[in-house]
């Protein structure tokens, strides 16, 4: 006779064909001694009138560039870019294949977007560079076919006023605003394997009136021949007022794995519903093994948000597994209608939320919500654990009219207002709604 637990393991394997996905990403791109011998070496002087043109000349040569010492970019930027429409010139333009590596003492202080990548069809690597209080962003990628950003460090950020995203640590997008079906940008600009790994981002400097994000990728990759394989792995992100990781409209596959996000206590008051990890619109998403401490005071703060607001770009078949989410707002917060550790909403179909650990306090640990009249369907909520969670409404919430939700093996309260919801208790017997 099969033991109950083994029966559940078999059921989970049937339900979650991708459940066991465990990403192991190893970055092996360090320059060897022989490579250094052939690299262009630039030594910082601390004088921006010397440092900026010296690095620009080196990256214009392409190949391998090694930075040593302290560089100052504390001078008005002069290079126009595609972001000029919103008034943002930049410091250094990377327009061809190059591998930039910092020596242990390499740092770049200040500068508006110190590295801006507009290298269509080329592969670009930036590694082991420390950025100190850059303005707007440390690295912003407009175009590349293959990209590695690894082992970089950002110490603080200076947001720019009067734009939607006033500060982004590392960004990959050709747009200064969120994409829509009527304005999708140029997703073909960014393609191939994109690896953003093992970076340390402390983005202190934003206020409640700034939108400071960690790592963003908007409108990247286009089928069938310009798809993107995006890996965001092993990054440490803290002191943000908006998402630590924000992905929208990915033409290809996105893996968000093993990141540690500590939001800090300040959330933006200009954009609602901050989410520590936010994935939106089309794409194939796996969100696994991340550790989140969401400290924001916003009543609708969310640990992991998965949704689409437009029918043309539905969110389908995302896998959210094996994450640890702690919701730790300040005392006295009255939770809003979207507060949750993990929230699925809008035009969202066939998404899986499984084996996550959720702690702390919020409206719900896991919620499947109607969003602006858009109704999710076929969501699977399986074997999540929230023994140390205090829900103001219920452990699991299924919103009004949400269809065909499957809830398996969840302890605690379930607030179900959906249609065709199936609730299976741990021993496999259907459970009545509460």
Image (cartoon, rainbow, N blue to C red):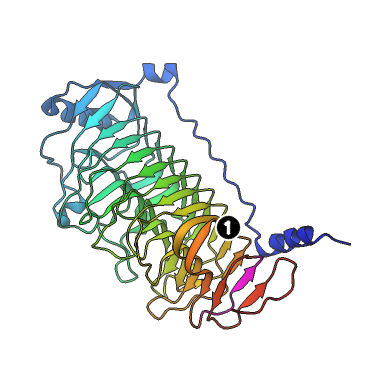
Task: Quickly name the residue at label 1.
Answer: 387
Residue at the outermost right position = 1
Residue 56, position as x, y percentages in the image = 21, 32
Q: Position of residue 250 (x, y in %)?
A: 43, 59
Q: Quadrant of residue 237?
A: top left
Task: Specify whether residue 83 is in view.
Answer: yes
Could you tell me residue 217's position as x and y percent? Answer: 37, 53
The number of callouts visible is: 1
Q: Image check: 286 left or right of 90?
A: right
Residue 422 point in image, percent of width and height = 64, 77
- In the image, 330 versus 323, the foreground residue is 330
168 inside magenta stretch: no
Which residues fall within the magenta stretch? 402-409
How many C-alpha atoms fall within 10 Å of the one at disc 1: few (<14), some, or many (≥20)?
Answer: few
Residue at the spot 27% in from the left edge and 43% down from the top edge: 204
- Front one among 48 and 240: 240
Give the image quarter of residue 418: bottom right
Q: Give the quadrant of the C terminus.
A: bottom right
Which quadrant is home to the N terminus?
bottom right
**Looking at the image, is 70 positioned above or below residue 357?**
above
Helix, strand or loop for disc 1? loop
Decide whether residue 405 is among the magenta residues.
yes
The answer, for residue 220, to whether it is visible in the render is no
Residue 31 sits above or below residue 384 on the image: above
Most foreground residue, 414 or 116: 414
- Which residue does the image show at 63% across and 61% down from the upper left? 383
Query: Which secondary structure type mostly characterizes the magenta part of the structure?
Result: loop
The answer to which image quadrant residue 268 occupies is bottom left
**Residue sitting at x 59%, y 68%:** 380
């Amino acid at each position: 006779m099969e033991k109950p637990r083994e029966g559940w393991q078999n059921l989970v394997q049937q339900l979650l064909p991708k459940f066991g996905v465990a990403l192991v990403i190893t970055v092996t791109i360090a320059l060897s001694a022989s490579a250094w011998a052939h690299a262009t070496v630039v030594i910082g002087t601390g004088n921006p009138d010397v440092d900026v043109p010296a690095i620009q000349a080196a990256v214009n040569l392409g190949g391998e560039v090694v930075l040593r010492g302290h560089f100052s970019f504390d001078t008005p930027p002069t290079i126009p870019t595609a972001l000029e429409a919103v008034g943002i010139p930049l410091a250094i333009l990377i327009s061809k294949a190059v591998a930039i590596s910092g020596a242990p003492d390499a740092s770049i202080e200040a500068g508006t977007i110190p590295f801006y990548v507009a290298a269509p069809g080329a592969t670009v690597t930036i590694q082991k560079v420390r950025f100190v209080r850059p303005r707007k962003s440390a690295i912003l990628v407009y175009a590349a076919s293959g990209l590695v950003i690894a082992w970089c460090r950002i110490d603080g950020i200076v947001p720019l006023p009067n734009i939607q995203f006033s500060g982004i640590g590392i960004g990959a997008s050709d747009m200064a605003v969120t994409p829509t079906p009527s304005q999708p940008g140029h997703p073909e600009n960014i393609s191939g394997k994109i690896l953003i790994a093992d970076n340390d981002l402390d983005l202190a400097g934003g206020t409640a009136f700034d939108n400071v994000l960690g790592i963003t990728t908007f409108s990247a990759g286009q089928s069938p021949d310009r798809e993107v394989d995006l890996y965001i792995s092993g990054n440490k992100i803290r002191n943000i007022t908006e998402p630590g990781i924000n992905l929208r409209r990915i033409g290809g596959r996105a893996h968000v794995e093993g990141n540690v996000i500590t939001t800090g206590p300040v959330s933006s008051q200009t954009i609602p519903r901050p989410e520590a990890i936010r994935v939106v619109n089309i794409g194939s998403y796996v969100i696994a093994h991340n550790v989140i401490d969401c400290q924001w005071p916003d009543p609708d703060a969310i640990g992991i948000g998965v949704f689409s607001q437009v029918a043309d770009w539905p969110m389908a078949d995302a896998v959210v597994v094996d994450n640890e989410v702690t919701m730790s707002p300040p005392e006295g917060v009255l939770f809003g209608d979207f507060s949750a550790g993990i929230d699925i909403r809008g035009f969202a179909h066939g998404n899986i939320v499984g084996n996550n650990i959720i702690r702390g306090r919020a409206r719900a640990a896991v919620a499947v919500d109607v969003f602006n009249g858009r109704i999710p369907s076929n969501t699977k909520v399986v074997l999540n654990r929230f023994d140390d969670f205090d829900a103001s409404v219920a452990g699991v919430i299924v919103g009004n009219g949400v269809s065909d939700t499957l809830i398996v093996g969840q302890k605690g309260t379930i607030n179900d207002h959906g249609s065709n919801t199936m609730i299976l208790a741990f021993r496999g017997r259907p459970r009545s709604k509460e």
